[in-house]
Amino acid sequence: MIVWVNGAFGSGKTTLVDELRPRWPEALVLDPEMVGYVLREIVEVPTGDFQDLRLWRRQVADLAVGLVEEYDRPVLVPMTLVTPMYVGEIFGALNDAGINVHHFFLKVPREVLEERIDGRSFTPDDPEQDERVRRWCKGRIAACMAAADALPSDTVFLDGELTPQELVDQVLARVQAGRTSGA
């Protein structure tokens, strides 16, 4: 099974997965950004967004499938994924492989997202790059928020302003309910 934690930049995806780990120690964590960073070292990313690379989407899906098949453990994936075609491509590949995907989306008001992004340091040794990353993240908030309406119908929307522990409780309850119902 895969638990995909989605939401805008600053919504708390990584924090939620970090909080899930101690409560679900057998779960593996796949950070698709790492796949993007590797690809950036190998090929040019003309748009600046590695999600636009078909190879990134294919590699993320293949790696997720491989982790589930090889290790027979749940996989936690904290990643913003809101372009409908890309969601369909990746989730379709996971579905085709027979893997159950629990898709969660953290909803957070714009002003809270901006505050969280402003409070983060992405590249502490490079203030100019840090600011570019902040602008990039903030520039995608509207698209991320708007995409919530186009996500798969089984997406579970969570209040991203709840505490991480409250969110963990909700995710684990949903996943457990899915296990007992055969989903």
Image: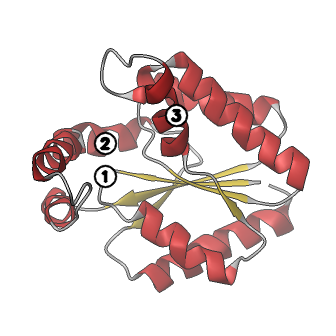
Residue 143 on image: x %, y %: 26, 36
Viewer-nearest of labels 3 and 1?
3
Q: Nearer the viewer, mark 1 or mark 2?
A: 1
Label 3 or label 1, whichever comes before in sequence order? 1
Distance of label 3 from label 1 (alpha carbons): 20 Å
What residue type is disc 1 on?
Phe
Tell me: residue 169, above or below residue 105.
below
The disc at residue 144 is 2
SS category of the residue bearing label 3: helix
Q: CA distance from mark 2 to mark 3?
A: 24 Å
Mark 2 closeness class: few <14, some 14–19, many ≥20 residues within 10 Å: some
Query: Can see residue 144?
Result: yes
Task: Residue 152: name its quadrant.
Answer: top right
Report which residue position mark 3 lands on: 38
**Which residue is the site of mark 1?**
9
Q: Residue at x 35, y 28 (%)?
A: 49
Q: Residue placed at 14% from the left, 62% from the top?
A: 118
Give the quadrant of the N terminus: bottom right
Viewed as shown, does residue 99 lie left or right of 4? Answer: right
Residue 172's mark? none
Q: Amino acid at mark 2?
A: Cys
Q: Nearer the viewer, residue 30 or 108?
A: 30
Q: Residue 47 in the image: x percent, y percent? A: 30, 19
Quadrant of the snapshot with the C terminus: bottom right
What residue type is disc 3 on?
Val
Q: Are marks 1 and 2 in contact (CB under 8 Å)?
A: yes
Question: Of marks 1 and 2, which one's residue comes earlier in the chain?
Answer: 1
- Residue 41, image x, y percentages: 46, 28
